[in-house]
Image: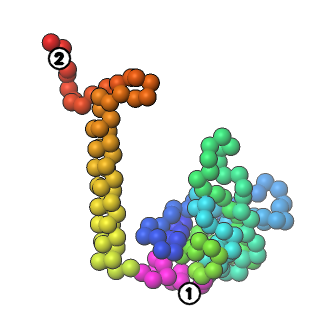
Amino acid sequence: RLLFRQKDRHFATVVFARAHASRAADAERPAGRTLFLANLPLSATGSALRSALEAFGPVDAVHMDAAGGVAASPRRSQQAHVVFAAAPALRKCLKCDRAIPLSAGGGGGGASSVGGTLGDAPEDRETLGASVAAFLQQFEADEASRARTAESAHGAMDEDGFVLVTRKAKGRSVAS
């Protein structure tokens, strides 16, 4: 597994990675030099992957796969095959235990940023804490708004003349 951290994001995306094993001699995706990636974010591009993974060695080609999951369901991720110029680069990439910075567009990310940090500019604990607190405050406000909307809908008549009946209390209801 590899971790990719997109620029300006607090959390890393877990990308499933393994060496590509082809059944026949495949000149486009040769075994031993090709990395298969699944669960890539939809914002990831071939050029962004190339620049992020060139830290492990020269990349010959990046093939983004259009088919990402079941055809009937909407795509939430994509897959890719990355062909390295040499087999040691593939092994080095598979042994990586740090998050790899991935820019959304295509630039950035290069060899110097894979060293030991989780991104281009690591955030301090206070900045991350403030970001999480702001998110939780917004979440609680949204939940309170949803609760108020549900409360106002209780017992109200809809456009067809039906009254919405909801169960408010948990436990047994006793009819009198």
Of the two numbered discs 2 and 1 in the rendering, the one whose residue sits closer to the viewer: 2
Looking at the image, tell me whether mark 2 or mark 1 is earlier in sequence order.
1
Depicted 68 relative to depicted 41: above or below: above
Q: Is residue 148 left or right of residue 42?
A: left
Query: Where is mark 1, residue-wise?
Result: 112
Report x, y in % for residue 84. Answer: 72, 74
Magenta stretch, residue numbers? 110-122
Choose top left, top right, bottom left or bottom right for residue 53.
Answer: bottom right
Q: Main secondary structure of the magenta part?
A: loop
Residue type highlighted by circle 2: Val
Report x, y in % for residue 111. Answer: 59, 84
Q: Is residue 73 left or right of residue 135?
A: right
Query: Foreground residue, 82 or 34?
Result: 82
Report the residue at 17% width, 17% height from top: 174
Which image quarter holds the C terminus?
Answer: top left
Which image quarter holds the N terminus?
Answer: bottom right
Query: Where is mark 2, residue-wise?
Result: 174
Residue 118 colored in magenta in the image? yes
Report x, y in % for residue 14. Answer: 51, 62
Choose top left, top right, bottom left or bottom right for residue 126.
Answer: bottom left
Residue 15 colored in magenta in the image? no
Query: Foreground residue, 116 or 136?
Result: 136
Q: Secondary structure at mark 2?
A: loop
Q: Secondary structure at mark 1?
A: helix
**Mark 2 vs mark 1, CA separation in Å:** 69 Å
- Category of crowding for the residue at label 1, using alpha-carbon neighbours closer than 10 angstroms: few (below 14), some (14–19), many (at least 20): few
Label at residue 75: none
Residue 150 visible from this viewpoint:
yes
Depicted 157 relative to depicted 81: above or below: above
Residue type highlighted by circle 1: Ser
Residue 90 visible from this viewpoint:
no
Report the residue at 71% width, 81% height from top: 58
